[in-house]
Amino acid sequence: MPAKSERIRRIEERFLNDELSDYALYKSTERHETDPELKAMVARFRDAELRHAKVWASLLGIRRLDTSRLPLAMRVKVGLYVVVRRILGIPFVTKLLERHERDGLEDYRALVRGERLAPAAMEKMRYIIREEEVHESAMLLQTGKHAAVLDYTRSIVFGVNDGLVEILAVIAGVAMVATSGFVVALTGVIVGVSGTLSMAAGAYLSSKSERVVAKSLAKGNGGVTSPAREAYYTGIFYFVGALVATYPFMLGASGYAGILESVVSVGIVLSIASALIAIISDTGVKARILEMLAISLGTAFVTAAIGLLVRVVFGVTIS
């Protein structure tokens, strides 16, 4: 029993820290938010998270709760929310907060299912779960209001993602047979422009088809996104991804050194893009990042191996 009591105490401390972190997150979001509706909502969430933290503090026998004690990782996370709000706007933040609420609610449900808590503690947990369910529903409504903008954000990150993966593969193959970094850079730009036009056309036609199908099924106006805007965002940011993969060779790099610089640059940006895609698509962030890195590095390795084979076996080089 003592071992179990210690385990329960560690669980209580973890949930207390989680609630204090959530309190700090909503407090920071409310302080920096300019949209009146979202500002009022996160203020309510902030107060609720503080109540939840006090519940855990009482279970732990803590009389005076210090709301300022946050680990470095959570302080960084709170700061990132502010940065994301400024860069990607309200729609992405609402999606991020919705995901955050859903994960927190699942943690509480798992706790109630898996632990033999005292009756008084169990009743408090059910109260917290009811409030968390209200929070999740409110965030779902907020996310629904910004569905069209999230579609454009999805087009942006998918465009960057495809540009990174595809052009890195091209760069890696060409760099193995080219003696000049300029040739690799020129190839990357040409393929990037071609890919930009292709991706934009594909996004336009896909969005157009979705609108036609939606209009046919619903007998309404179809989708709320513009095919032209989706094509623009997908194409432009595909080219941005292509430039990330190509820029080391633009700056004079060549051979293995250039490939390594491209791989590192693509890996960093691809991880960020993959995390954004995972959040928007409600999938696992770590799994998505690892999958995309494996695909990107795998294709780069294969094309580099083919380029090396052509150079060694056939003696082909490009000056």
Image (cartoon, rainbow, N blue to C red):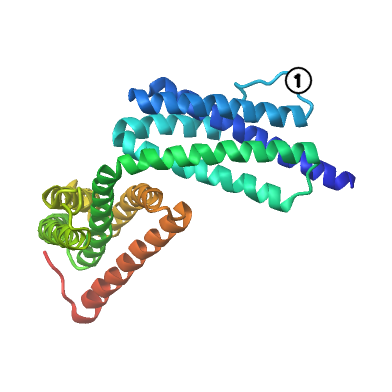
Q: Which residue is disc 1 drawn over?
A: 63
In the displayed image of the protein, which residue is found farthest to the front?
219
Q: Secondary structure at mark 1?
A: loop
Q: Amino acid at mark 1?
A: Arg
- Check the image and name the residue furthest to the top: 64
Q: Position of residue 113 (x, y in %)?
A: 70, 52
* Residue nearest the viewer, comparing 173 with 66: 66
Query: Horizontally, is 129 left or right of 101 in the view?
Result: right
Q: Dot 1, how many residues are within 10 Å of its Cα: few (below 14), some (14-19), or many (20+)?
A: few
Residue lying at the far bottom of the rendered structure: 313
For residue 105, above or below residue 189: above
Please tell me how many numbered marks the rendered image carries. Answer: 1
Q: Is residue 29 left or right of residue 127?
A: left
Q: Residue at x 65, y 51 (%)?
A: 110
- Percent x, y for residue 314? 19, 81
Q: Is residue 70 in view? A: no
Q: Position of residue 316 (x, y in %)?
A: 16, 75
Nearer to me, 177 or 238: 238
Of residues 253 and 246, the one nearer the viewer is 246
Q: Residue at x 22, y 77 (%)?
A: 310
Q: Quadrant of the C terminus?
A: bottom left
Which residue is at 58% across, 29% downward?
Answer: 49
Q: Is residue 153 above or below residue 168?
A: above
Find residue 185 and report its image quarter: bottom left
Whether 187 is drawn above or below 252: the answer is below
Report x, y in % for residue 245.
24, 53
Q: Kindly tell me whether residue 309 is visible in this rendering.
A: yes
* Image side of residue 60 versus residue 295, left or right: right
> Residue 32's image quarter?
top left
